[in-house]
Amino acid sequence: MPKDRLSGRQQAILEFITGFLEENGYPPTIREIGKACGITSTSVVNYNLNKLERDGHLSRDREVSRGLRLADALPGNLVRIPLVGRIVASEPVPMPSDPAVLGEDKGIELTRDIVGVGDDLFALQVKGDSMVDAMIGDGDIVIMRPHPNVQNGDLVAVWLTDREETTLKRIYMEGPLVRLQPANPTMQPIYIDDPSVIQVQGRVVAVVRQT
Amino acid sequence: MPKDRLSGRQQAILEFITGFLEENGYPPTIREIGKACGITSTSVVNYNLNKLERDGHLSRDREVSRGLRLADALPGNLVRIPLVGRIVASEPVPMPSDPAVLGEDKGIELTRDIVGVGDDLFALQVKGDSMVDAMIGDGDIVIMRPHPNVQNGDLVAVWLTDREETTLKRIYMEGPLVRLQPANPTMQPIYIDDPSVIQVQGRVVAVVRQT
DNA sequence: TTGTATCATGAACGCGCGTTCTAAGTCAAG
DNA sequence: CTTGACTTAGAACGCGCGTTCATGATACAA
């Protein structure tokens, strides 16, 4: 039974583990599980745990006390993203390598299903209303990833060397020229005929706004 | 030393516990800590753990194997917010009580420092570009909280009964009339002279956009 | 009936692991 | 120097806890 067609006893065990983990911060022992689920024998609990592991609901470390973890709520589901600075229209994007743009270890935590894989993420807080055409306002936090190679349609932060301006746009390579498309569909794109004036600083992975 | 004036050994222990917890999903034993930090004696580890507990960096359960948890990363820091439906301009906001607007248990997880306290949160995915004036676009997820009493300046979802339209605006009670202020500062506010035509559906706590 | 697979029980084995005790080294105050 | 608080060592005690074994109880197919 690879799916959730599990016995009532196994379901009770799973629920108990979940609650125990949330309450105590560490997994229960076999005997604690048995006591909570009305099972007198440790081998029965062990048997059901192996069953649950085989079905992919949890994973176990042999010979280790409390050596089990749930399949969901995997470690690393939560990512701490450093808030490395502010982003304004009149300056290039500060990069995480910059010396201590924000001294303290400010940061924001998001789950992997929002930002995807990778550990080179960094966050910037938007200063000013210069990016309303990207539907990004003052105080918004943009999560970015350094982007070696850009793909068509990516929402990227670009530094326009000729205008001395940072902007967030979707980028499209269209033959000899580059189209920068605002996220706001009511606004007009910018066409660049000299690709050397644009520097892609990173790709926008997500935007978070607290109100 | 109530603050972070802790010895190098204690700092090493804390860091190891953090990493171990992230990697394995359960806390390390005293002996595992000692081995990783170059401490041969279990009593020394025990001594330092008690120290760290006294200073509030972690908490321990006596006589329990792996019975420790870090002070931060407390349980409940993460909130699972149900995604109960979509929000469009032409309909009132669906409420979490509505019968199964989204059958599956879709949801989004955020940390408490983003959404604040309270467990009555729900999430809606924006459909269409009707809320660009609130700097919210197609596909954005708005986190909302049912809002019994509205305060001036709150960003709220309102249903305008006369226009049959849902909109997200900041709300200000100004004597006899109500001002609905778009988040985009370049746009003009709406003034309502008859408060009965507006129904506040909830307060916007946060907005998340994945790109 | 006789298989095999699934699930439950209780007991025993043995290392895992927190605890505690004794001892000693370091360092600043008296 | 001595004193005492802080820190580190090493070893031993004893229950905690995962593992394994022997034994049945159902249930379904041959």
Image: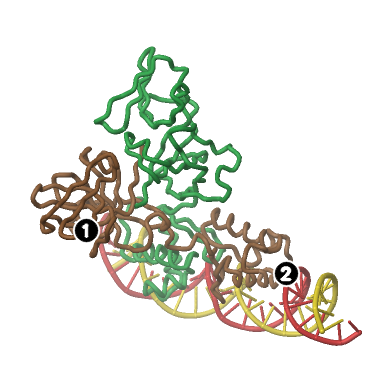
Chain colours: A brown, B green, C red, D yellow
Q: Tell me which corner region of the image, top left, top right, bottom left or bottom right, holds residue A96.
A: bottom left
Q: Chain letter of disc 2?
A: A
Of residues B10 and A154, the one drawn nearer to the viewer in this rendering: A154
B118 above or below B174? below
The location of residue B74, given as percent across then percent down, is: 46, 52
Say which residue label 1 marks. A173
**Picture coordinates of residue B176, whole percent (x, y):** 39, 12
Q: Which residue is mark 2?
A: A41
Spot occupied by residue A73 in the image (x, y as percentages of width and height): 50, 59
Q: Residue furthest left?
A: A162
* Mark drawn on residue A184: none
Q: What's the amino acid at mark 2? A: Ser
Identify which residue is drawn at 56% across, 76% down.
A62
On-image quarter of the N terminus of chain A: bottom right
Q: Where's residue A65, x and y in %?
A: 56, 70
Q: Residue at x 15, y 59 (%)?
A: A176
